[in-house]
Every structure is written in C-alpha cells, then in structure tokens.
C-alpha cells in the first residue's frame, strides 16, 4: 500500500476520531447514532494511523507530499 494521506490530513483524522470518542464516552451521543459514529471514528482512526485511505485510492486522491 502506498501512503496517500499527508500529515495534516492524518492529524485531522486522529483529532476527529478522538472528539467522537470523547462525545460517545461522555454520553453526549448515544444510541444508534453513537454506535454508527464510533464505527466511523474507528475507521477514520485506522486510516489515519496506517496513512492509507481506500476511498482516496479509488478516487485517485493523494494528499501525501512525499512520494513513496
């Protein structure tokens, strides 16, 4: 897998996932929406950690400045 997520995109994804997790664990978001958002946050966090987004790959988007 080639990296297709740049550092700014990576940091943004990790922060968004952390915000969603905090909102879920403080019971600000609950129920079905809470579960759906936690699954989305998990996916966002995973793509931020591994620096690869399958959706970006399918669309031909690359925010990584360093070519690997």
Image: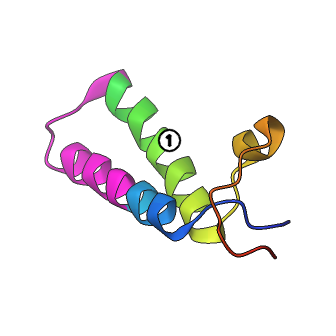
> Which quadrant, please, contains the C terminus?
bottom right
SS at circle 1? helix
In this picture, residue 39 sits left or right of residue 30: right
- From the image, give the main secondary structure of the stretch colored magenta: helix
Residue 19 vs 58, above or below: the answer is: below
Give the magenta range.
15-32
Q: Nearer the viewer, residue 40 or 57?
A: 57
Report the residue at 49% width, 58% height from top: 9
Point out residue 28 in the picture as x, y percentages from the top left corner. 14, 37
- Is 31 contained in the magenta span? yes
The relative height of residue 31 versus residue 66 in the rendered view (above or below) is: above
What residue is shown at x 20% (from left), y 45% (from top)?
Answer: 23
Residue 35 coordinates in the image, percent (x, y): 40, 34
Q: Which residue is mark 1?
A: 39
| In the foreground, 33 or 10 | 10
For the point 62% across and 57% down, which residue is it?
63
Residue 13 belongs to magenta span: no
Residue 5's spot in the image, x, y percent? 63, 61
Left or right: 61 as drawn, with respect to 25: right
């Amino acid at each position: 897998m080639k990296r297709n997520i740049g550092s700014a995109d990576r940091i943004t994804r990790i922060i968004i996932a952390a915000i969603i997790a905090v909102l879920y664990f403080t019971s600000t978001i609950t129920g079905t929406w809470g579960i759906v958002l936690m699954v989305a946050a998990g996916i966002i966090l995973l793509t931020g950690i591994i620096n690869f987004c399958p959706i970006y790959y399918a669309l031909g988007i690359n925010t990584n400045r360093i070519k690997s």
